[in-house]
Image (spheres, rainbow, N blue to C red):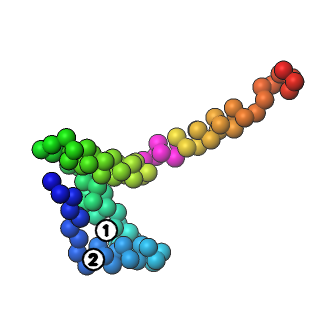
Amino acid sequence: MTAKPAAYDKEVIYAFRALFDGKASDGQQKRAMEWLLFNACHIGQLSFMSNERDSAFSEGERHIGLQIARMREPEALALIEGKSKAERAAAKPEAGRKATE
């Protein structure tokens, strides 16, 4: 398998151009993300190919798409907020413990 660019049309090109310029409409934003996730990253498809190298490449594309898609999940924000609270707590000295110990 030779890695080929995902198929796109004028609508996708204009959607990405508007997105890059910070001027994309709601519809253009959705169109660009749908194309990215489903056409370029192939989420929703199996990553198995006829040989190991192609399968690994396909899984890499899919992995990126899944990471992007997870940003929509409520748990993504909760994980970051929980992590930063834990990091702040770890940075504080324990109560009742002397700084010289």
Q: Is residue 57 left or right of residue 87?
A: left
Position of the N terminus, as image quadrant, is bottom left
Q: Residue at x 65, y 37 (%)?
A: 87
Residue 96 is at least partly visible in this image: no
Q: Is residue 50 left or right of residue 75?
A: left
In terms of image quadrants, where is residue 50?
top left
Q: Residue at x 23, y 75 (%)?
A: 9
> Given contact means CB atoms under 8 Å apart, are the residues at marks 1 and 2 in contact?
yes
Task: Measuring from the top left, give residue 21's x and y in whole percent.
Answer: 46, 77
Amino acid bearing label 2? Glu
Residue 20 disc label: none
Q: Is residue 77 magenta?
A: yes
List the residue tagged with mark 1.
31
The chief SS type of the magenta part is helix
Q: Residue at x 52, y 40 (%)?
A: 79
Number of marks: 2
The local secondary structure at tag 2 comes to helix
List the residue tagged with mark 2.
11
Position of the C terminus, as image quadrant, is top right
**Label 1 – label 2 distance at C-alpha:** 8 Å
The local secondary structure at tag 1 comes to helix
Task: Measuring from the top left, give residue 86's x and y in whole percent.
Answer: 64, 34
Q: Which residues are magenta?
A: 73-78
Task: Measuring from the top left, give residue 77's x and y in whole percent.
Answer: 52, 47
Q: Residue at x 22, y 44 (%)?
A: 53
The answer to whether 2 is drawn above or below residue 28 in the figure is: above
In terms of image quadrants, where is residue 6?
bottom left
The answer to whether 69 is drawn above or below residue 80 in the figure is: below
Task: Measuring from the top left, give residue 16's x and y in whole percent.
Answer: 36, 73
Q: Is residue 28 magenta?
A: no
Count neighbours of disc 1 (C-alpha within 10 A) and say few if under 14, some if 14 to 19, many if 20 or more: some
Amino acid bearing label 1? Arg
